[in-house]
Image: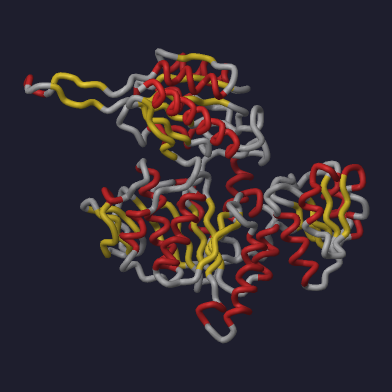
């Protein structure tokens, strides 16, 4: 077996170890020089896994029966083409995890909202007394989570609660496109709009990759699908599972919906919508999906309202970093498409100064420009897409567009443009009434790879600059 990719997320190493432990003869390779992946190589020293790096990386790949590329490896690279032509089966890491798993898998996919929804589902299951482990495209690779579940089951002896974990996995289109047998007990599709067109041939290819989450489901399984998203809803035809629709717009007696201010599952009230801490209407949809998925896997929801009300969200997703003299700073570095940034803008009643830009994944910023103009947003642009964004914003009528060379300068420029909290005359002349300050929002609408290693580094740089501004304000107070 040949595993491709040794990176900081540990997917290749986790797959190699899991296969080696089960008696497979494994080679793992990476085109980076050995010194750049030294930590991952060190993690395989106690095995007899063969490690090939640099120019030697793909030596002998044509002899492999199975090749497992890490998610970041495109499926059309020449070594994979050679292996495929020689008869090798190409499968993703989540397929390996599925084949090795003992317990049921609950898989979450979609263009945006995956991490928030996956994390919340884990919280809901644990609060309901169901043993749940979370991983996949976030945190630990699915294979590593499967190994953790196996170790816990062995330690639990005859205790059935420890023998059967629910594995909650965020799964990406990159992972799904190389699956053949992957069959989640519950599959969640949050939404579907253009993304990753730098990897997928076109929107149709991206849609087909996402649809594979349903390909092997059977009537005893469940599919939680966004009723309000026409592209996502159309894929209900691809599953044999019971469909649990979720909607913010229409009643869904057999799924999840919002009515009379309540989030409901199968018509039963679970939580007041106003109790949800997460900002934005799109996050209410994510919560509905999480509630439906938890119910579909068998979790009681009698304590779910408390869990939802406590849930603060996850890093880099509309993460409130802090305030400086009444100006709120929000880190939404995860927003790598125009649609995600639109959802972020619409999460705020306050006027927003938006920091956007990076490497484009989708070359159409027209709607984003229109939303910025309609909401009176200011724009600070950075990165490779700066001119493209600025042009779209200008055509839409955005009045203030400023360019910055790097993110730290963009944060400081945005702060200078943004108005702090103030006191205005109250209604009817009854004296001053407080006005909330405006918002500086990092929501790039683009990938980060022109300036950063990944979106997480971009978010951390943003937060570090905000912390500097907060410290300076404290010193001057």
User: Is residue 156 positioned above or below 442 on the image?
Assistant: below
* Residue at 23% over, 51% down: 261
Q: Nearer the viewer, residue 469 or 298?
A: 469
Along the line of sight, the residue nearer the viewer: 363 or 302: 302
Whole-percent x and y of residue 389? 53, 21
Residue 224 visible in the current orientation: yes
| Percent of width and height locating residue 125 | 44, 66
Point out the image quarter for the N terminus. bottom right
- Residue at 43% from the left image edge and 48% from the top image edge: 313
Q: Which residue is depicted at the point 32% across and 50% down?
A: 276
Query: Extreme bottom residue here?
Result: 158
69 in relation to 360, above or below: below
Which quarter of the image is occupied by the C terminus?
top left
Place of residue 229 in the rendered image (x, y in percent of width and height, measured from the top left):
43, 46
Which of the two residues, 264 or 319, is positioned nearer the viewer here? 319
Q: Quadrant of residue 414?
A: top left
- Position of 224 with respect to 432 (left or right) is right
300 up-or-down from 177: above or below: below
Total labels: the figure holds 0
Q: How is the image coloured?
A: secondary structure
Residue 431, position in %: x, y? Answer: 10, 21
Task: Identify the residue at image location x=83%, y=69%.
Answer: 24
Residue 227 as seen in the image, left or right of residue 385: left
Residue nearest the viewer, comparing 423 with 264: 423
Residue 373 in view here: no
Residue 319 falls left or right of residue 388? left
């Amino acid at each position: 077996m040949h595993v491709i990719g040794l990176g900081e997320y540990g997917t290749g190493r986790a797959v190699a170890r899991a296969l080696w432990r089960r008696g497979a003869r494994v080679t793992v390779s990476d085109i980076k020089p050995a010194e750049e992946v030294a930590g991952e190589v060190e993690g395989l020293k106690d095995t007899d896994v063969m490690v090939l790096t640099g120019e030697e990386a793909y030596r002998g790949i044509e002899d492999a029966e199975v090749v497992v590329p890490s998610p970041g490896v495109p499926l059309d690279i020449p070594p994979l083409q050679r292996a495929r032509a020689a008869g090798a089966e190409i499968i993703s890491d989540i397929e390996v995890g599925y084949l090795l798993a003992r317990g049921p898998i609950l898989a979450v996919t979609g263009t945006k909202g995956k991490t928030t929804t996956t994390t919340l589902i884990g919280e809901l299951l644990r609060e309901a007394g169901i043993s749940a482990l979370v991983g996949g495209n976030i945190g630990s690779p699915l294979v590593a989570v499967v190994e953790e579940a196996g170790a816990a089951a062995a330690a639990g002896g005859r205790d059935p609660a420890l023998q059967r974990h629910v594995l909650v996995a965020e799964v990406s289109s990159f992972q799904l496109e190389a699956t053949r047998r992957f069959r989640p007990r519950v599959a969640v599709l949050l939404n579907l709009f253009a993304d990753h067109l730098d990897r997928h041939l076109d929107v149709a290819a991206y849609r087909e990759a996402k649809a594979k989450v349903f390909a092997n489901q059977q009537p005893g399984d469940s599919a939680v699908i966004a009723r309000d998203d026409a592209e996502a809803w159309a894929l209900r035809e691809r599953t044999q599972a019971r469909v649990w629709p979720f909607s913010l717009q229409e009643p869904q007696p057999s799924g999840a919906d919002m009515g009379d201010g309540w989030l409901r599952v199968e018509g039963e009230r679970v939580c007041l919508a106003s109790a949800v801490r997460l900002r934005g209407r799109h996050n209410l949809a994510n919560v509905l999906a999480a509630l439906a998925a938890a119910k579909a896997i068998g979790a009681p929801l009698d304590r779910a309202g408390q869990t939802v009300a406590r849930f603060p969200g996850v890093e880099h997703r509309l993460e409130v970093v802090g305030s400086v003299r009444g100006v709120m700073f929000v880190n939404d570095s995860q927003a790598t498409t125009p649609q995600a940034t639109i959802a972020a803008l619409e999460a705020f009643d306050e006027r927003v100064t938006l920091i956007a830009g990076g490497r484009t994944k989708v070359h159409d910023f027209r709607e984003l420009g229109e939303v910025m103009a309609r909401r009176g947003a200011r724009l600070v642009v950075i990165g490779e897409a700066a001119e493209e964004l600025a042009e779209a914003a200008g055509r839409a009528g955005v009045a203030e567009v400023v360019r910055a060379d790097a993110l730290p300068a963009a944060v400081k420029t945005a702060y200078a443009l943004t108005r702090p909290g103030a006191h205005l005359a109250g209604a009817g002349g009854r004296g001053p009434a407080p006005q909330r300050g405006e918002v500086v929002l990092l929501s790039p609408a683009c990938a980060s790879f022109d300036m950063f290693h990944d979106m997480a580094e971009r978010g951390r740089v943003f937060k570090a600059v905000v912390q500097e501004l907060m410290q300076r304000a404290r010193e001057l107070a």
